[in-house]
Amino acid sequence: MEQFDVAIVGAGPAGSSAAYYLASMGFQVILLERGKSPGSKNVFGGRIYPYSLRELIPTYLEDAPIERMITKEGLTFMTEDASLSASFSSPTPDGTSGFTVFRSRFDQWLAQKAVEKGAFLLNEVKVDDVLFEKDRIAGIVAGGDEIRTHLVIAADGATSKIAEKAGLRGSFDPKNFSIGIKEVIELPKGSINDRFQVESSEGVSIVYVGYVTKFLRGGGFLYTNQDSVSLGIVVKGIDLVERKINVESMMGSFKQHEAIRKLIVDGKLLEYSTHLIPEAGFKMMPRLFTDGLILVGDAAGFIINNGYTFRGVDLAIASGIAAAETFTQLQKDRNTNRSSLSAYLANLDKRNVISDLKKFKNGPSFLNNPRLYSEYPKILIDLLRTMYSIDGRGSKRVREAARETMKRRISITRLVRDLIGGMNAI
């Protein structure tokens, strides 16, 4: 096939961002997507933090397919028959709280932006292998065709075959993965505004802990869209296997809980999807580049989960920009050896990608603590139930109620250790 400067595998946010940047600079770029269209095979919760998108396309607000701007955050602890919620409301005019989208729409929009700049997009193309030449990667093999390039950018997701074939990562540890399940439930816009107490352009993000996962490690989420809500669960895969729990039945119980049922009543199921989610963060990150190849987005392990925020798309876009910038900084001979591509690390550092991953590198280990999902939601709700229940047998002071509640559930020593661990990790 025709010689291209860069071949990009995967037209998700990372790949399309790199394609947009490179095509804007006049390079010949081919963007290959295995789905019928960009975003057709991509699953995520529903929220994007836009700082990196703003760097790439400052005018994105003019036509990006945004559902709602997040103005309200919520955290809900659940037991079988009760819930405790905390809510934080603070509209951010600069969009730092992010917005909700559907990947099928957002990815198509971003890929089309790259095409408008001159990138060549091919859908329904499976990349079979990388093309080696004199111990360096010189392109890709797709459908029996060899596509020779100066650089390959692998944006093919968390289980990247390109990273594996290039020898940048080994086999995965199942302990580092969770199972995500998501439903999109249609509701009238007016019902969403009333139930969540927002205006039409305002959105809500809620995190759920405890009974949502049957007290297993993980949590639930809810995001509001214009006329639907995205509702989901993320739970450790090995916990599901060990406890022999079906994730679909877990989702059913979650939806029947009083904290959720009233929010989605009369809703219509529009979409159902599942996804494998890597959660080890910095400690799971593979080598990021080799001669002729750079990893970006999920393929590079750029995901941060610190319990109260889950970041992936913003890091994917930032890494796509960084990879493209690295190529533009090379000399005219386009010598993409490892020494030259090491500039990728500096370009990532400019956007705080690696530093943020390092900052929260102990987060996954802390969040693996099963007490966070079993004991602590029960402690909080037991305490509140005691405080607000008057039975005529004598009321307790808050400190007395707290002491008795914790005595039934956890030792003070363990509580202090968990608090210190949390402060150091997240």
Image (cartoon, helix red, strand yellow):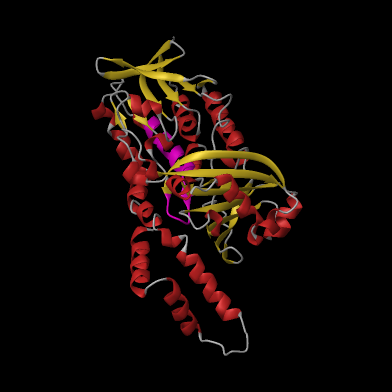
Looking at this view, is 260 or 145 the one in front? 260
Residue at image coords 33%, 72%: 413
**In the image, residue 224 lies in the stretch drawn in magenta:** no
Q: In this image, 200 relative to 272: left or right?
A: right
Looking at this view, is 140 or 403 the one in front? 403
393 to 166, vertically: above or below: below
Q: Which quarter of the rendering shows the C terminus?
A: bottom left
The answer, for residue 233, to whether it is visible in the render is yes
Residue at image coords 46%, 38%: 317
Q: Which quarter of the rendering shows the N terminus?
A: top left
Task: Give percent across and percent down for residue 53.
Answer: 50, 40
Q: How many marks?
A: 0
169 to 131, vertically: above or below: below
Looking at this view, is 9 or 252 the one in front? 252
Residue at image coords 37%, 32%: 295
Secondary structure, magenta segment, majority class: helix
381 to 332, vertically: above or below: below
Q: In this image, 177 relative to 266: left or right?
A: left
- Which segment is the magenta one? 305-325
Task: Give percent across and percent down for residue 82.
Answer: 60, 67
Task: Give percent across and percent down for residue 267.
Answer: 73, 49
Residue at image coords 58%, 24%: 36
